Image: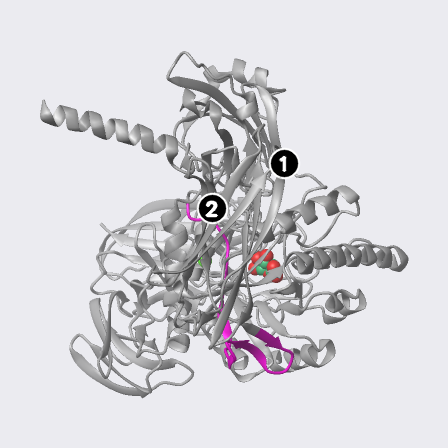
Amino acid sequence: MKSYLKLNLLFLFLCLHQLVSAQTQYTINASWQFIKDDEISDVNDFLSKLNKSENIDLPHTWNDKDVIDEHQGYYRGAGWYTKTVKIPSSYQSKELFLFFEGVNTVAEVYINSKLAGTHVGGYTRFVVPISEWIQFDENKLQTTFQVVVKADNSFDEMIPTLTADFTFFGGIYRDVNLVVKDKVHFNFEDDASNACFITTPLVSASEGKVHLKARIKNSATDKRKLKLVSKIYDPKHQLILEKKSKLQLDHKENRVVDIDFETIAQPLLWSPDHPHLYTVVCEIWDAKSNTKLDEVTNPLGFRWFKFDTDKGFFLNGKPLKLIGTNRHQDFKGIGNALPDYLHYKDIQMIKEMGSNFLRISHYPQDQSILEACDRLGILTTVETPVINTVTEDEQFDKNCMSAQLEMIRQNYNHPSLIVWAYMNEILLKPKYKKEPKRYKQYTDYVLQLAKKLEAITREEDPYRYTMIPNHSGLDTYKNAGLTEVPMIVGWNIYDGWYGRSYDALEDKLTKFHDTVKKPLIITEYGAGADPRLHSLDPSRFDFSQEYATAYHQHYIKVIKKLPYVAGANVWNYADFSSEQRVDAVQSINNKGLVGINRTPKDVYYFYQASLLELPFLALSTKSWKRRTCIEDENNKGIATLPVQVFSNQSDIELYINGKSIGHKNVENSIATFEVPFTNGINKLKAISGEEEDYAEVRIDLLPRSLEQFPINGLSINLGDKRFFYDDQIDQAWGLNQTYNKGSWGAIGGKSFVRTFNRRQHPYGTNQPIEGTYNDPIYQTQLVGIEQFKLDVPPGVYEVILHFAELEGNHVKHLPYDLMDDEEMDNEKVSRTFSVRINDELLINRLDLMNQYGEYKKVEIKTEIKVSNNQSIDIQFDKIVGEPILNAIEIYKK
Ligand code: GCB
Ligand code: CA
């Protein structure tokens, strides 16, 4: 009985508490009905089709699957969502809102079938007031209302982004909140900011002055006497300052209130090493009833900074080289609809990499990103997604401006944020390139838009810097006047990737610096690396992890060396979805330091070694767990392979299977050992002082003589110098060798090389291959192969031949490439050949193109009996054109 009473009291208390609590906000993400259909004409049409809907939870995107399937393109159109929301009828006296954190790209919000609000732009937040559309049921405790949201990610020439190298995932892909406020509240509905804007007009090590601008709104029909209470808490959350002011608001009055706090002596400064965070709490109280009506909490950091054209960046008076990455907001398999955990985890990994800098690109991201950067100490830039090209139209400008304004107001109070940017590589895809007059008119238009964006940014926030990130075309941007506009000029530089070589990087930067005479940030640089590809002879565009390491090793050396390079951001922290991209992994941009599932690649460890101050070392082998390799020529049972150790120490010792193989010096953060691996598991240990790292590598040793035929057979990738590791089934593909008596290998043939007008793809083609996820195996081949021969012990063998026709008319362009478009001049080849095994005809007149089509995986399997003193001899008989073979597997039965 007693406890029953207690419970009742608790319930009563909770109810009362709810009535008096300043404001209520919670997500309404669970259980929406959804239909993806571009044909739905309006809300009623949608509601009549609910029997065809599926039940989903937010955050949600409708593109999570169609960007990974093999079909080109992904759905860009409308998606309709609905949910019935139940609220206490007592909310009638309150003001209700829906707060959307992100809907891509255009949203229409209906309450009880009436249009309550719209929003354009997929990356900023927006608020829809909804009270007016709800019929409160005073006789019942609860009232319900129905929300319908139409989201649309169609291409619209009036809405940025027009084109870019990433996927425009559609849907309500961030949280949706129900917000309940008193009629008097901080006016957050106008631009989804929290309506309190904090600045530190004066800050030094000895004192800090804090200013607060608050927007207050009274939407009630009576005038209200109010108290504004503002408090500052120190990093240990002790209250150190409190200010109270009285004000009276007429009915329907909006008021901006300015508050200056007393000077804080010796504030704890905010920096990457010591991100001391203060807190500012603003409250509105009703003066008569002394109840709290609204409350907003914001972070506060005391720091000052400066970008210098020649000397780079200074934080709190000390030079600081800004080094970090860019970040996109998607993840393997779930598109852009990420749970918060993944946002926080990314920032944690970015911090653990040793970065102090993050370019939040190409658009504002989930709030948790900047919150985590404030807390962990990572300086940031954020930008609006006006990319590659513009539409010369007022409506387009308007949408750019509103995105910029929303971005600034919504993210205003983050101490980690120091630069507002806009327009990424805006002259990359210039229209009217061949009509000088018209081109000038176009770049003038871009310039005017840039000036408008610059002006609004400086007006909104005079305390931060502005930036435009350009691609490498110095003259293009300079001639257009664009380098004059922002305070910092960013350059996306891909020398050694799209551009031939990185050797001239330093000269290029010097030229950019000397010509533009403005603070400079390398806003992007990066090299693609398919986590599955490795090379002992890395080269540009081979997508090997080793080339990416070499590329970044060079860049980081130059970046650290040149004082006027204020900062640099690797493109990209993680691999990301770019549906139309044709690279090593289809539809994925592979320039990440970690994979799309956040597994670190070698380069991630390399950056740790190069940036961390505490002793660090890491073995490079972590993501290359299984390797097929040929035994050394003069060393039976051994395969010697280089192993890199990334470290900030000077001397490393390496052990294999408990035995030391000696010491090596670290140069540019890397020590390289030649390691004698044996068949099976090899345990590696690297040591320097107290630091140790371990790795296990499984070697599938390919003997030169096949007397003992390997139990897991031979998997050989032909026409390739790279090792391929299939991470889905843990299969390692080895390199081919030329046949020798007593051994195995191919006879005749040359590696297929696709020649483009302006560059050679070093390995085969970069076209996607239908029917496989293991494109690199099929993108490479031996052309003109005569035989593949193996001297094997007698027995029954299974032979699997892998083919794909790589000569085709139909060539998919890189949709996004920093080089000019290439003319593909290949002609359709005809090719017909037969395959015999040990003189018996296996495949008669194979014509891949006509039987299967181009760029299509074709696998043919057979069995062969081998008697004493016989080999397996696979013969390729040329009929028309040259015979080919892409890969081969052989198993003993
Ligand atoms: C760039 C773009 C970025 C691309 C990148 C690349 O310059 O700004 O959006 O993803 O190059 O990988 O090509
Ligand atoms: Ca191949």
Residue, far left: 1
Q: Which mark is residue 563?
A: none
Within the magenta stretch, is there residue 356? no
- Which residues fall within the magenta stretch? 306-332
Where does residue 310 sit, x and y in percent of width and height? Answer: 63, 82
Q: Nearer the viewer, residue 496 or 709?
A: 496
672 lies left or right of 557: left
> For the residue labelled by badge 2, is the local secondary structure a helix, a strand or a loop?
loop
In the image, the residue with mark 2 has its CB under 8 Å from the nearest atom of ligand 2: no
Residue drawn at (56%, 21%), measured in percent from left and top? 133
- For label 1, the residue is 154
Name which quarter of the figure residue 399 lies in: top right
The answer for how far apart the CA atoms under marks 2 and 1 are is 33 Å
Report the amino acid beneath label 1. Ser
Report the amino acid beneath label 2. Lys
Quadrant of the rendering where the N terminus is positioned:
top left
Q: Nearer the viewer, residue 656 or 478?
A: 478
Where does residue 879 sit, x and y in percent of width and height? Answer: 56, 51
Residue drawn at (40%, 85%), measured in percent from left and top? 667
228 lies left or right of 164: left
Where does residue 454 sit, x and y in percent of width and height? Answer: 71, 59
531 lies left or right of 405: left
10 Å crowding of disc 2: few (<14), some (14-19), many (20+): many
Q: Which mark is residue 857?
A: 2
Ligand 1, by image quadrant, is bottom right
